[in-house]
Amino acid sequence: MKTIKLIDMTLRQLPTLREGALTFKEKLEIARGLDRLKVDGIELAPIAGGKADQLAGRTIAAMVAAPLTAAVEVAAGNVEETWESVRGARQPRLNLLAPLSPVQMEYTCHKKAPAMLQAVVDQVKRARFACENVEFSAVDATRAEHGFLCQAIAAAIEAGANRVTLCDTAGIMLPDEFAAFVAKVRADVPALSNVEVCVQLSDEMSMGAACAAAAIAQGVAGVKCTATPAGLPTLAQLARFVEVKGPALDITSGLRTTELGRVVGQIGRMLQPHEQSESPLGNVAVGETAGVCLDAGDEIGEVVKVVRQLGYDLSEEDNARVYEAFKRVATRKHFVGTRELDAIIASTAMQVPSTYRIENYVINSGNVITATANILLDKNGEKLRGVGVGDGPIDAAFLAIEQIIGHHYELDDFQIQTVTEGRDAMGSALVKLRADGRVYSGNGISTDIIGASIRAYISALNKIVYEEA
């Protein structure tokens, strides 16, 4: 079965479509989300100038495992500068963009065909000298003169390109027309059999996904797409195509489709104009970063502002502790989202004496019995036992604790994640309880995730009891 490569161009396309460039934090959050989806490549926009684009490229290169491609416009000629921004990636690639239609050559590059052909050869050679993997994108290929298009592609491959992308930039072809176009180019350029062939299709007529499907049937190796609508077929459209027609065409993809909806939704909410959101966090699901992303350069005032947006009302002393811990994490991770900030607050702020301590607990659960929890707590030397029956072991454990304390607190948030890998992995649980309008968080760590959850609940509960006293 052939694996079709889905190469994401969100970071390259969005700056040209939205008002204002993407912020540094937005770029990092988008790259991190795409990396979680296991896309077959993340493509960056050409460097516009200044150090900001280079810094973003270097930071993304250090944090993602996916192949990272940096686009270079042939007319700009900044191959070395672009290479420096992505050379730290695990699988770096340079993509030379060359318009090949007569109109685009004249308009964007002010070159005739012979001069453009020489520029293509020179720039591909420069890119190949710096980077092992070089891509040549024939921009506006469907409106180029066929003979010159084939000549330019053959010259790029001879100069060192090991991937060629055919672009229908104008989106003027129907699926059967584009399939015939791909077949003819492949037949007239024998060297294409030795390199990867990908396609990049405009969705101008809402035919991008259909044209991509037709190209896949012609044997192309990959398709350029975007996570959110940005003028190209979307990841969701192509994932659905592979899911439905994959068995019949003997194709598959490496995309993690189980996380696709959540990651795409997160990116979409992050890119919404601020004036359309009720709050900087918006309406998000448990555990999502909601577009809030801090880095080591943020001052304490910015961090405290986000802490308050999360619902915490901390003292100046606790804010200082949180900021100190945040700085330690941010210098190692490049950025800190709300999930990490929640964990920092839970383990750093409002550290109080333990009114309640866990003595022991017994959990019974299975697919043929109702989950029950039997928990024994120590409260200042007094032994208190509670039994809970719930929808799963953690729900039962929390209900048992509520029976002991005689009070129900609103569960504002609950998160679990692994801290280490392997069969004996440590699990971390975060519990946020709301009392009198304030949020109190607790953190627990254990190889038993149920035990970690109970410890996190008790940690948050102790903070509430201490404040009430």
Image (cartoon, helix red, strand yellow):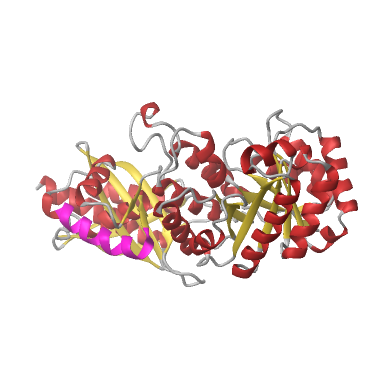
Q: In which quarter of the image is the N terminus?
A: bottom right
Residue found at the very far left of the displayed protein:
469
**Closer to us: 140 or 318:** 140
Q: Position of residue 408 (x, y in %)?
A: 27, 41
| Picture quadrant of residue 360 | bottom left
Residue 385 seen: no
Q: Which of 449 and 86 is in front in this view?
A: 86
Q: Would you say residue 453 sits in the magenta stretch?
A: no
Residue 391 horizontal side relative to residue 368, left or right: left
Q: Which is more toward the observer, 431 or 363? A: 431
Tell me which residue sits at (81%, 32%) in the image.
174
Where is residue 311 drawn, in percent x and y? 26, 41
Q: Which residue is painted at 47% across and 57% down in the image?
A: 57
Residue 324: where, in percent of width, then height?
Answer: 21, 60
Q: Is residue 5 left or right of residue 190?
A: left
Position of residue 204 in the picture relative to residue 292 (left or right):
right
Residue stretch rendered in magenta on the structure: 318-334
Q: Where is residue 193 in the image (x, y as percent from the top left)?
A: 84, 60
Dominant SS in magenta: helix
Residue for point 81% across, 64% down: 194
| Horizontal relation, residue 95 to residue 320: left or right | right
Q: Is residue 457 above or below residue 103?
A: below
Residue 72 appears in the figure: yes
Instruction: Compare residues 234 and 170 and report the one nearer the observer.
Output: 170
